[in-house]
Amino acid sequence: MSDAYRQAGGSCPDCSASLREHAGRLVCDDCDGMMLSEAEYTTSLRELDGSQSALAVTRGKPVTQKCPRCTEPLQDCELAFGGKKLSGRYLACATDGLWVPNKSMVGAYAVVGHRARGRGGAGNVLETIPAGPGGHGGAIAIRSVASAFANRPEFVSLSSVAAKTHTAFVSAFAGQDLVCPKCDAKLAFEADRWACKSCAGSFVEDAALVAMVQDITQAHWEMPAIGTDVGARGCPACKTKMVVEKFHAVEIDRCQPHGVWFDADELQTVLVESTNPKETGGWLKKLFGRHRT
């Protein structure tokens, strides 16, 4: 890409490439990161779940990377939306907003959008509002963010992770007491998963897990045959020792009749990777068994 196209921007904090200006934002065409104001990132997340939740930014120590706008040192930071932490790496500038890497952005949109579907949230806002200057009453911020990569056909479409209408999942274990296989705390049912407030792990029934992946990938999925490597953890539903399945850094515990246990952040890793066009055909295919119809 020519330097004439990469206008006005300084250097990318992640890969040092030249940045370009798009609608008041700085965009990296090499790693797909973007500089956003806190207000705009908050609005785009609110559009996905239909809430008025706040974005909390907790700033840490300065880092060596500099803000591409003001050249002051950036700070490591943690983000929470609606009181729940967003995984991924973010950098903050005191005056110019947030540096948001592509993987962190897509992961946040995937998880917030799915969270909304689980509680009967908004429909696909990117498909329902009018396009162009006449669009109103809907996903103005997220459409604007997506438009920064309109020239990049390989960039995953943010519409694929926008909130879609989703029938509330009814657990087969409604009314029962399920216990965390990691820390023995009582699990609480939240929309489409059994969550542990103590260790932040999640037990997801097979039907709910398939629905999550299909919602995000818009492709048919089936769970594969279970392995034979029995681990030490008991299924929260039946107490039978679960099978351990690994792929790279992700290790899950699985009970064939009932569901899958994810330690903290592992479920989010699955949702993030499912939106990555380079990984969808490999990572999830090996982990879950993908079959198109």
Image (spheres, grey):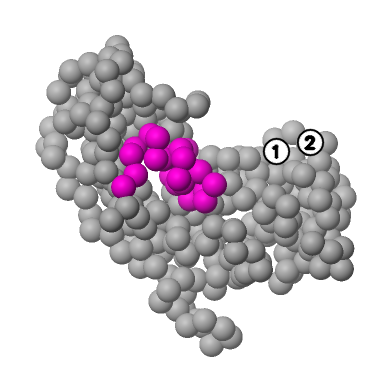
> Disc number at residue 251?
none
Q: Quadrant of residue 133?
A: bottom right
The amino acid type of the residue labelled 2 equals Val
Residue 265 location, x and y as percent? 46, 34
Q: Secondary structure at mark 1?
A: strand
Residue closer to the observer: 271 or 264 = 271
- Confirm whether the magenta stretch covers residue 281: yes
Relative to 187, is 147 on the left or the right? right
Q: Quadrant of the N terminus?
A: bottom right
The disc, 1 or 2, on the residue closer to the chain's N-terminal end is 2
User: What residue is drawn where x is 39% and y is 68%?
Assistant: 124
Q: Quadrant of residue 192?
A: top left
Relative to 41, is 120 on the left or the right? left
The amino acid type of the residue labelled 1 equals Asp
What whole-number distance in Å separates the C-alpha atoms at marks 1 and 2? 7 Å
Residue holding disc 1: 76
Q: Residues within 10 Å of mark 2 (few under 14, many from 20)?
A: few
Q: Is residue 22 above or below residue 97?
A: below
Q: Residues within 10 Å of mark 1 (few under 14, many from 20)?
A: some
- Confirm whether the magenta stretch covers residue 25: no
Q: Secondary structure at mark 2?
A: strand
User: What residue is drawn where x is 23% and y is 38%?
Assistant: 205
Q: Is residue 281 above or below residue 178?
A: below
Relative to 73, is 279 on the left or the right? left
Residue 177 location, x and y as percent? 16, 29
Tag 1 and tag 2, C-beta contact below 8 Å? yes
**What residue span does the magenta drawing correspond to?**
268-291
Residue 188 location, x and y as percent? 26, 35
User: What residue is drawn where x is 73% and y is 69%?
Assistant: 22
Residue holding disc 2: 63
